[in-house]
Image: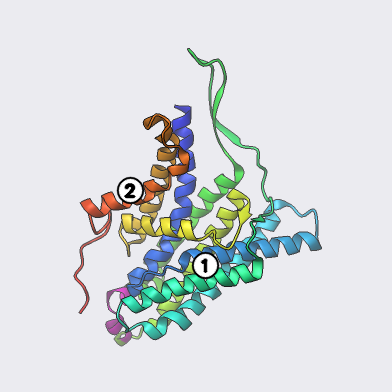
Amino acid sequence: MDIFLQQIINGLVLGSIYALIALGYTMVYGVLGLINFAHGDVLMIGALAAYSAMSALSGVAPGLPGWVLLTAGLLTAIPVCMAVSFSIERIAYRPLRNAPRLAPLITAIGVSITLQTLAMIIWGRSYLIFPSTLPVEPVDLITFPPSAGIDYVRTVSITPIQILIVSVSMLLMIALTLIINKTRIGKAMRATAESPAIASLMGINPNTVIAATFMIGGGLAGVAGVMVAANYSVAHFYMGFIPGLKAFTAAVVGGIGNIYGAMLGGLLLGLVESLGGGYLGQLTGGVFGSNYQDIFAFAVLILVLTLRPSGLLGEKVSDRA
């Protein structure tokens, strides 16, 4: 039971990160019908920008508390990622808005490679040690006393950075839901998603709405990038590829274009991956270990697309004329 509960907690932490990234994918697709495959690399830019800011601040004022450094990293990563996302939309995607669907898709892959190359030029190819910000000692949540056949105390624990990841992710998901449903820009996003032409007739500027959508998604990716780097204590130019790919999988599983689906898909994928990685060795008699846990993301994707192609919370819609 202690192993099971520990894997549940690890899955919720991992799923919270996936959900944050998946929201960027699903928002852009919902408004523009475009898969922004460069979104994972925006996460990477945010993590490396935060690393630079935190390292510079530590050099200028050594001995600062960890939460101050982490706050400075977040305050750097969010605007940087928003600016990068805005630039991507303005330079790479807007000129191709009326082009065949294959053109923006290829462009997105090209933008992803470009961002990775620029990051490699600026920060180098080596793994960078992300500054330690919070205590590393885990917090015990549940303690299991010794029992029959087990003569030691077992605990279910969570680290402070994992608590922060879950808390920040949940707050941001709630905030995004309120923005989409309660604010003018949220209403404009929903109107533009229905029909950009009709929305423009109602006084909504689709270009402004689409740019805002990219920027909000970029801000979320920036937070996710800092959380990933802080959780694993490393940052590098290729760190956004796998989380971005899995977050895209989560968005599709939940129902691409549906923000609630992105949240559900991210949490579900994190739980499946964590439980699968924890029990894969036992289920296969030691043939496969936890290093094969990445296959679960795509196994779930294949299963969901086979049984429900529109995703868990997606709706069947006809192609726009």
Question: What residue is disc 2 on?
Answer: 299
Q: In this view, does 291 lie above or below 201?
A: above
Q: Is residue 205 above or below residue 67?
A: below
User: Does the magenta portion include 310?
Assistant: no
Residue 215 seen anywhere in this rendered image of the structure: no
Residue 295 seen anywhere in this rendered image of the structure: yes
Look at 57% across and 66% down and name the residue there.
45
Question: Of the residues shown, which amino acid type is indicated by label 1?
Answer: Val
In this rendered view, identify the residue nearer to me: 192 or 7.
Answer: 7
The image shows residue 191 at horizontal and vertical percentages of 31, 75
Question: What residue is disc 1 on?
Answer: 42
- Per the picture, the main secondary structure of the magenta-coloured stretch is helix
Question: Of the residues shown, which amino acid type is indicated by label 2?
Answer: Ala
Which quadrant: the C terminus?
bottom left
In this rendered view, identify the residue nearer to me: 95 or 207.
Answer: 95
- Nearer the viewer's eye, disc 2 or disc 1? 2
Look at 75% across and 62% down and name the residue there.
57
Residues shaded magenta: 191-200
The image shows residue 228 at horizontal and vertical percentages of 55, 54
| Disc 2/disc 1 C-alpha distance (Å) | 26 Å
10 Å neighbourhood of mark 2: few (<14), some, or many (≥20)? few
Quarter residue 260 falls in:
bottom left
The reply to whether discs 2 and 1 touch (Cβ–Cβ < 8 Å) is: no
